Image (cartoon, rainbow, N blue to C red):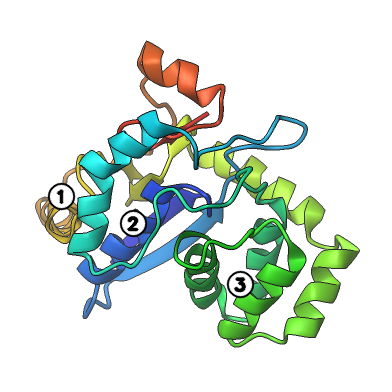
Amino acid sequence: MHKIVVISDYVCPYCYVAEEALKQAAEGREDMVTEFHPYELTRKPAPQVDTYHDNVRREKWAGGLVPDAESLGMDVHFPPCVVPRPYTHLAAEGFLYARERGKGDAYNEAVFAAYFTEEQDIGKIEVLKKAAGKAGLDGEEFAAALDSGIYAKAVEQERHETEGITKVSGLPTILIDGRKAEIERYTLDAFKALLEEADRRQTEGVADDVCCESSEPAQEEEEEMHEGGCGDGGCFF
């Protein structure tokens, strides 16, 4: 049995492709338990960013991430025409609501699609309400829960617990049996290889190291992460 922890944000394009690649790679396997942890790239009061008019990042995605997404059969817009990029604390609150009702995975899929396929502002409750409905949730009850802020503290606790799992410096962060996955490409073959490596380590009894530290990002990525942007290979803080 493998335990997979996925730490991501709904506005991170690499996170969306990683979710799909992992889903396809795990198809037919019953030996995996997956946990999703929402983690905001840009938190208030940090300023929101405009990724749609950022031609530098657009070119980076076009050179690698877009072809990977297309190879998975995804219909996406990288970046979507949503300016500025939304805060996602409400979307994260919605996930906790959905998870309590056994709809976490369906909700994630609907929210990612709302942003990257439908190009909707997922910082708005009305947009999240529609996504919740597509996930099989009661839209009115969902919207009332978000409007009340009942899950706001729980999102902060979730973030705190996530930071206890690993030092998050970029997204997505994926741990397989406590070991941080090194992602070079976001393709089906690449993610199948990650799972096959986990199988090998388990079969051979190789000790798994809980990843509590991350390597420091390169200087260029460090500059981008203060902007809340996405660079080569992931989204950085």
Judge left or right: residue 74 versus residue 135: left
In the picture of the structure, the residue carrying the numbered disc 3 is: 99
In the picture of the structure, the residue carrying the numbered disc 1 is: 201
In the picture of the structure, the residue carrying the numbered disc 2 is: 17
**Amino acid type shown at disc 3:** Arg
Please say whether residue 216 is visible from this viewpoint.
Answer: no
The local crowd at label 1, few if under 14, some if 14 to 19, many if 20 or more residues have their Cα within 10 Å, is some
2 or 3: mark nearer the eye: 2
3 or 1: mark nearer the eye: 3
Towards the viewer: 2 or 80: 80
Residue 17: quarter of image: bottom left
Q: Residue at x 90, y 65 (%)?
A: 148
Give the mark nearer the N terminus: 1 vs 2.
2
The local crowd at label 3, few if under 14, some if 14 to 19, many if 20 or more residues have their Cα within 10 Å, is some
Give the SS element for disc 3: helix
Give the SS element for disc 1: helix
